[in-house]
Image (spheres, grey):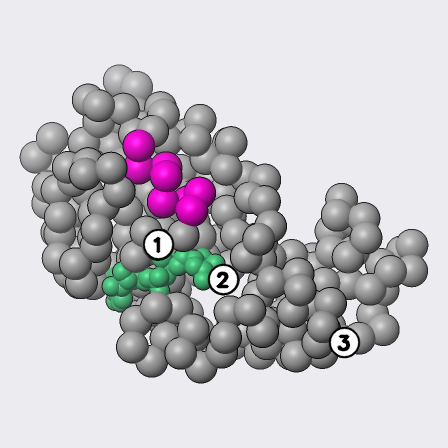
Amino acid sequence: MEKKKMVVLTGAGMSAESGISTFRDSGGLWEKYRIEDVASPEAFAKNPKLVLDFYNLRRKQLDEVQPNVGHLFLSRLQEFFDMFIITQNVDNLHERAGSKNILHLHGELTKVRSSKYPQLIYDIGTKAIQLGDVCEKGTQLRPHIVWFGESVPAIEAAVELTAQADIFVIIGTSLNVYPAASLVMYAPAGSRKFLIDPNPVEIPYGLKFTVIKKSAGEGTKELEKLLLSI
Ligand code: APR
């Protein structure tokens, strides 16, 4: 029998139990930094060292964290479903948990690219980059991250995937940031829709989801029970 297509949209809450701070919870990253100082093209133009250091720290943190039970659970589901993960996270924890089809909407910490030639992208793992580190054409390298005010090149592919979902699951995102949040409206009317988050999340367009009010780890266990009764 053909496997059902399951599309999962994840956000910072997915990695919270691995010890990576979310953005908008109390104590989240955006309480410690101002978005406009570290995550915008203007910030990079104004104070590139601060921006590089911010991402260098976050990249280094990847060596200190591990995928949590939620990441591992999603990777195990590949056996039963045609699985696709659309993540807003720039960490590599879905990959390290063994998930295969992962679309990074907001970029990846383990990659950098030329600040002038966006097609020149390099894998750097968890190494730091500094001012003066350049691409093969001699221009400064920058994080391969979608900053505020920049376009989201992967959104079209994400819309296409979401539109084919039999099961659409949202885990650990406040759905505050567009266009990622707009994906909810592309899940087919007949698809099963679940949202896992320990806190209340306002779902755009008044769409109805089955809400599992739990952390990613606990919530995915609950999801397993619900899916097995499909
Ligand atoms: N398990 C699941 N969800 C959790 C957990 C947990 N253990 N802890 C917190 N959450 C939930 C919060 O309740 C919140 O709804 O995770 C969500 C995190 O929301 P945000 O901090 O807004 O993160 P996210 O939605 O991923 O942000 C989107 O904003 O700053 C940008 O580019 C950045 O990709 C990011 C985007």
The quadrant of the picture showing ligand 1 is bottom left
Mark 3 to mark 2: distance in Å?
Answer: 20 Å
Q: Nearer the viewer, residue 134 or 147?
A: 147
N-terminal label among 1 and 2: 2
Callout 2 amino acid:
Asp
Label 3 sits on a secondary structure element that is loop
Q: Is residue 167 above or below residue 150?
A: above
Task: Please give the range of residues in magenta.
Answer: 178-185
Residue 82, picture quadrant = top left
Number of marks: 3
Q: Position of residue 49 (x, y in %)?
A: 71, 78
Q: Are marks 1 and 2 in contact (CB under 8 Å)?
A: no
Of labels 1 and 2, the one closer to you:
1
Q: Residue furthest top?
A: 1
Q: Is residue 37 above or below residue 113?
A: below
User: Where does label 3 land, which residue?
Assistant: 130
The answer to whether residue 95 shows anywhere in this view is yes
- The main secondary structure of the magenta stretch is helix
The answer to whether residue 19 shows anywhere in this view is no
Q: Is mark 1 within 8 Å of ligand 1?
A: yes
N-terminal label among 3 and 2: 2
Label 1 sits on a secondary structure element that is loop
User: Where does label 2 land, which residue?
Assistant: 91
